[in-house]
Image (spheres, rainbow, N blue to C red):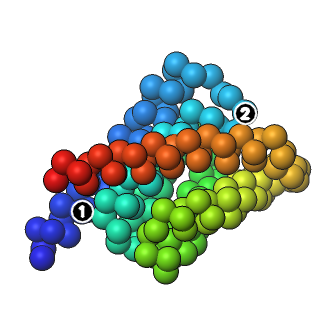
Amino acid sequence: MKKYLTNKLFLSITVAVGLFLVNNILLGAVVPRLPGGSATGVTTMLAIAWISLHLKKPGIIPFIFLVYGLIGLPSHLAMGDKYYFAGILLLVFPALIFDILLYFNQYSIVSYIFIFPLFVVCVKFSTQYFFYVKSDEWAYPGLKDMFLSLLFGYVGLLMGFLIQKNFAKTK
């Protein structure tokens, strides 16, 4: 049992580190900021869909977002960003809600499709709140930005589903 949990923890940390490297180094250098975080939306939801379908354990999704955020913490603290840790929590909380809802729906593919928009809305509003705290300017998330986040997130979910389906066949 202990080895089983250790393997899941290691796999989750590996996914979080890999996702951080791809999103922040590879995509940050290759793809400039696009509306809706398109490239990172695809890779993030691909990783989340695959790992959560593969492990089907509650807490995996917020854990990955927490590790992802903590990896970036030193660079933000070095730049004097005193609000970054609060930003991590504002991302982990919607991920926790997303994970709980998926858990109660037994990680069915249909539940991902219907719960994902709630996750995007929660993340968009929590990040807007985060920027409001930092700058005292409230800006509602743009509909175009939210639509693109949903679109590219669904592409990532579909890719994650297909990878998990093919991974399950090879086992």
Query: What is the x, y in percent for residue 141?
Result: 82, 49
Residue 123 shows in the view: no
Q: Are marks 2 and 1 in contact (CB under 8 Å)?
A: no
Position of residue 76 relative to residue 69, above or below, is above
Compared with 89, 22 (above or below) is above
Q: Which SS class for mark 1?
A: helix
Report the label total: 2
Residue positioned 55% across, 68% down in the render: 111
Q: Residue at x 45, y 25 (%)?
A: 26
Counting other residues with Cα less than 10 Å from the Cα at mark 1, is it few (<14), some (14-19), or many (20 or more)?
some
Name the side, left or right, on which 24 lies relative to 167. Answer: right
Disc 1 marks a residue whose amino acid type is: Lys
Q: Nearer the viewer, residue 117 or 89?
A: 117
Residue 128 makes an appearance in the image:
yes
Image quadrant in which you'd find residue 110? bottom right
Identify residue for label 1: 8
Residue type, numbered disc 2 = Pro
The reply, left or right, for residue 111 in relation to residue 141 is left
Q: Dot 2: what SS? A: helix
Q: Residue furthest top?
A: 30
Sequence-wise first label, 2 or 1: 1
Q: Quadrant of the N terminus?
A: bottom left
Residue 77: mark in rendering: none
Residue wearing tag 2 = 35
